[in-house]
């Protein structure tokens, strides 16, 4: 047997297509995973927006210590929520990884496939979560300040808001990718038979 | 290349599972050789080590000791990439539970091994359609596994196993989840592939319907080869 090994030509678009099909088939499950990400990110973005508004409104007294605590907690919730969603999502698909291995998928192919899928969810969840978070951060302060006052603050700080959106996207993408990479890598390292036998 | 007579050679293969504190000796020194274009059934009661042997031959699981040669290549010496290559092009797998990818249509399931093999899109389309025709499912190309019956799913799995024109098709209990008639259809399909394409077929099974079409039957008992019979002997045996 001559083992001339051409590096499989596995284009990005094919990967995107495979990942997209997987998300579509598991639409409900993907939706729940995405909701986990959205909630985590929205919570964080809402508290950061709220801090921004409070900071601007109470210029003399400055941001109070408890607000830092809240933002810290929101980050922990966000990390925990996303990591948990992604770990569960990969864990219930170890058998599928076994099938990919049986039909000749390289470990790196399989891991990349899962990462692309996670990133699609991460971008979606991070984007929606960021926007919802900013809106919520605005709404929760309506009882304290008037709509117009806060609109002015947000307009003056539009760059910070854009940065906040980008931060939401970044955190969401990094966390989803990382929380997928670790279990997917571990599952892809199993022998195909072990992966197929895996029960969750 | 020289003419290779044996496509699979197994030498003194051992495999032990540790289940808690109990050691299960699944394979305890199995040896045999399989010729090219043979149709082999590995038979034995459940728990005899059939599936473990199936996984070992297919390079799906690591063994504790012994040697497995596929086309004279010792698979223990292959690295992860070479093993993936072997599974991709040398061996096609068929499982009791079909193991299709549920997110994809029948045609896509057949195409995915070709995607891993780097086959171009047009070529994939063409070959997957041909394969669907061979297994008699041309009209089901766009159906997902959930919309297919067990027998139809197994046909898709067979077409997928053939995607990269492997030298060997390994089938683990391919008829166990099917009713009698569908099982017979699948057996006939495998037999035709063996006859027409010259694919070596190795099935682990306890389906006695397989006996009449196998060239040889390897009986496994308690992790050892109990006996190896030619079909002719078995048929005489049943007359006795």
Image (cartoon, rainbow, N blue to C red):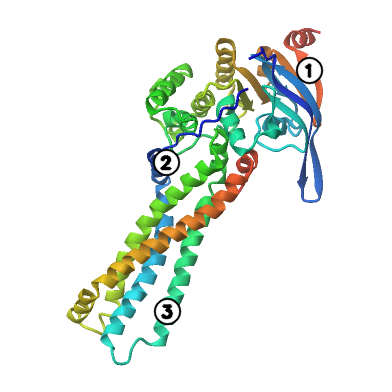
Q: Distance between the residues labelled 1 and 2?
A: 46 Å
What is the secondary structure assignment of the residue under circle 2? helix
- Name the residue that disc number 3 marks: A70
**Residue B78 x/y as whole percent:** 66, 34
Residue B229: tell me if it is visible: yes
Q: Which of marks 1 and 2 is in front?
A: 2
Residue A31: tell me if it is visible: no
Q: Check the residue under mark 3 and report the chain it is in.
A: A
**Is label 1 on the same chain as label 3?**
no
- The reply to whether the C-beta atoms of the residues labelled 1 and 3 are less than 8 Å apart is no
Q: Check the residue under mark 1 and report the chain it is in.
A: B
Query: Residue at 54% of width from left, 39% of height from top?
Result: A106
Above or below, A38 relative to A49:
above
Neighbor class of circle 1 (other Cα within 10 Å; few <14, some 14-19, many 20+) is some
Query: Residue at 44% of width from left, 81% of height from top?
Result: A69
What is the secondary structure assignment of the residue under circle 1? strand
Neighbor class of circle 2 (other Cα within 10 Å; few <14, some 14-19, many 20+) is some
Q: How far apart are marks 3 and 2 (CA)?
A: 39 Å
Q: Which of marks 1 and 3 is in front?
A: 3
- Name the residue that disc number 1 marks: B228
Q: Residue A107 carries which label?
A: none
Neighbor class of circle 3 (other Cα within 10 Å; few <14, some 14-19, many 20+) is some
Q: In which quarter of the image is residue B235?
A: top right
**Residue A75 x/y as whole percent:** 44, 71
Above or below, B13 relative to B39:
below
- Name the residue that disc number 2 marks: A15
Q: Which of marks 3 and 2 is in front?
A: 2
């Amino acid at each position: 047997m001559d083992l001339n090994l051409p590096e499989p030509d596995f284009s990005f678009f094919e990967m995107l297509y495979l990942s997209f099909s997987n998300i579509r088939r598991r639409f409900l499950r993907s939706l729940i995973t995405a909701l986990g990400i959205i909630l985590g990110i929205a919570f964080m973005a809402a508290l950061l927006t709220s801090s921004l508004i409070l900071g601007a409104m109470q210029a003399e007294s400055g941001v109070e210590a408890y607000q830092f605590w809240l933002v810290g907690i929101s980050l922990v919730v966000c990390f925990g929520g996303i990591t948990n969603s992604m770990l569960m999502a990969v864990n219930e698909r170890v058998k599928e990884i076994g099938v990919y291995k049986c039909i000749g998928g390289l470990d790196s192919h399989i891991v990349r496939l899962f990462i692309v899928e996670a990133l699609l969810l991460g971008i979606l969840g991070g984007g929606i979560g960021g926007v919802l978070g900013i809106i919520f951060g605005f709404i929760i302060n309506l009882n304290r300040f008037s709509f117009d006052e806060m609109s002015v603050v947000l307009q003056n700080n539009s760059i910070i808001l854009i940065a906040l959106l980008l931060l939401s996207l970044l955190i969401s993408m990094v966390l989803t990718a990382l929380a997928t990479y670790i279990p997917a890598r571990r599952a892809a390292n199993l022998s195909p038979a072990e992966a197929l036998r895996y029960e969750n | 290349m020289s003419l290779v007579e044996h496509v699979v050679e197994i030498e003194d293969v051992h495999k032990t599972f540790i289940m808690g504190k109990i050691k299960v000796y699944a394979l305890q020194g199995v040896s045999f050789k399989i010729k090219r274009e043979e149709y082999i059934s590995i038979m034995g009661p459940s728990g005899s080590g059939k599936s473990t042997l199936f996984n070992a031959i297919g390079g799906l699981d690591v063994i504790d000791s012994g040697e497995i040669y596929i086309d004279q290549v010792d698979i223990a010496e292959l690295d992860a990439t070479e093993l993936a290559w072997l599974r991709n092009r040398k061996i096609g797998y068929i499982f009791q539970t079909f193991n299709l990818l549920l997110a994809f249509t029948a045609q896509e399931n057949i195409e995915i091994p070709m995607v891993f093999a780097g086959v171009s899109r047009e070529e994939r389309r063409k070959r997957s359609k041909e394969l669907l025709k061979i297994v008699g499912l041309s009209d089901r190309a766009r159906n997902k596994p959930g919309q297919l019956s067990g027998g139809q799913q197994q046909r898709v799995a067979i077409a997928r196993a053939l995607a990269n024109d492997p030298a060997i098709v390994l089938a683990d209990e391919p008829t166990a989840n099917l009713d009698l008639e569908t099982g017979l259809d699948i057996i006939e399909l495998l037999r035709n592939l063996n006859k027409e394409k010259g694919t070596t077929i190795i099935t682990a099974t306890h389906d006695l319907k397989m006996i009449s079409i196998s060239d040889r039957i390897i009986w496994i008992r308690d992790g050892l080869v109990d006996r190896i019979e030619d079909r002719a002997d078995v048929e005489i045996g049943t007359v006795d």
